[in-house]
Structures are given as structure tokens and as C-alpha cells.
Amino acid sequence: MRILIDTNILVDYFRSQRSSRPKNKRQEYCYQQAVQFIDQSIEQGVELLVSCHTFKELLQYKNISAQEERRILENLPLMCEILETNKEVAYIAGLLSRQSSEYHDHHVEDCYIAATAN
């Protein structure tokens, strides 16, 4: 089985590894669920995949610490296969963007991530 993981799950997974505590119960729950999902998937031999656009999104936050960036760079390739964009993915992303007014001007990265899942 192969699963394409969205950015939000990985954000929560890597935030769970910070030394600071979650801001609230909801955030704590999301962190726990992300860790449980990824750990169980790896234990069950599920092949985890991420789009290269997800990889970019993980690193784009301007307040990311050097420690967190290093944790992502070192661990993400061990956990997941990072899928590259090619012309087929770009074509599908373009179709998705054209078909959705929401995605036309915003969330172009989400169109690429969705297209990678195809």
C-alpha cells in the first residue's frame, strides 16, 4: 500500500518533536494523531509518499528554527519517498487549477500536491 501524505500531517508530526508544549488540547491531539498515523504506517510497511511541493511547504515558514529545518531534512527522506513534479503532474495541476476558482488564484501548491497523488 502507498499513501501520499499531505503537508498538515507532517507539520503536526514535526511540531510534536519540539521541546515546547502544544498551545492547546486540540493541537496536542493533532500532534498525537499525526505521530500515531506515521508510526503505525511505517510499522505496517506502508510506503509513505510526499510531493516535492509538500517538502517545499514544510521548509517555507519564515520562523522555522535551524533545529527543525535540520530535523525535516534528515528525517523526511528516511520516512517518505519525495515525488518530483513532471510534465504529467504539471498538466493535471493546471487542469485542477483551471476547474476551480478557489485554486485558480490561490493554493497552486495544493493543485500540484493533488496532481502528484494521481
Image (cartoon, helix red, strand yellow):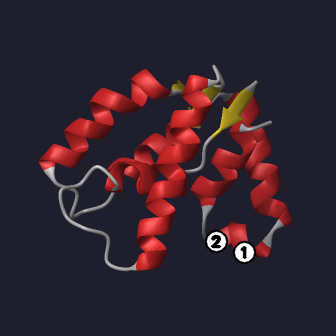
Q: Quadrant of the C terminus?
A: top right
* Coordinates of residue 5 in the picture (x, y in percent): 61, 43
Assess disc 1: are there few (<14), some (14-19) or many (≥20) residues with their C-alpha within 10 Å of its C-alpha. Answer: few
| Residue type pointed to by label 1 | Glu
* Coordinates of residue 54 in the picture (x, y in percent): 51, 45
Q: Is residue 73 left or right of residue 33?
A: left
Residue lying at 60% horizontally and 70% vertically, measured from the top left = 106
| Whether residue 78 can be seen here | yes
SS assignment at label 2: helix
Tag nearer the camera, 2 or 1: 1
| Residue type pointed to by label 2 | Asp
Q: Which residue is mark 2?
A: 105
Q: Is residue 38 left or right of residue 11?
A: right
Q: Determine which of the numbered discs, if any, sits on residue 102 in the image.
A: 1
Which of the two residues, 86 or 61, is positioned nearer the viewer here? 61
Q: Is residue 36 above or below residue 11?
A: above
Residue lying at 31% horizontally and 60% vertically, measured from the top left = 61
Q: Work out how far the residue at label 2 is from the one at label 1, CA to CA, in angstroms.
A: 7 Å
Residue lying at 16% horizontally and 54% vertically, measured from the top left = 65
Q: Is residue 48 left or right of residue 11?
A: right
SS assignment at label 1: helix
Can you name the residue that lies furthest to the left here? 66
Assess disc 2: are there few (<14), some (14-19) or many (≥20) residues with their C-alpha within 10 Å of its C-alpha. Answer: few
Which of the two residues, 54 or 77, is positioned nearer the viewer here? 77
* Coordinates of residue 75 in the picture (x, y in percent): 34, 30
Q: Quadrant of the N terminus?
A: top right
Q: Is residue 78 above or below residue 67?
A: above
Which of the two residues, 2 or 40, is positioned nearer the viewer here? 40
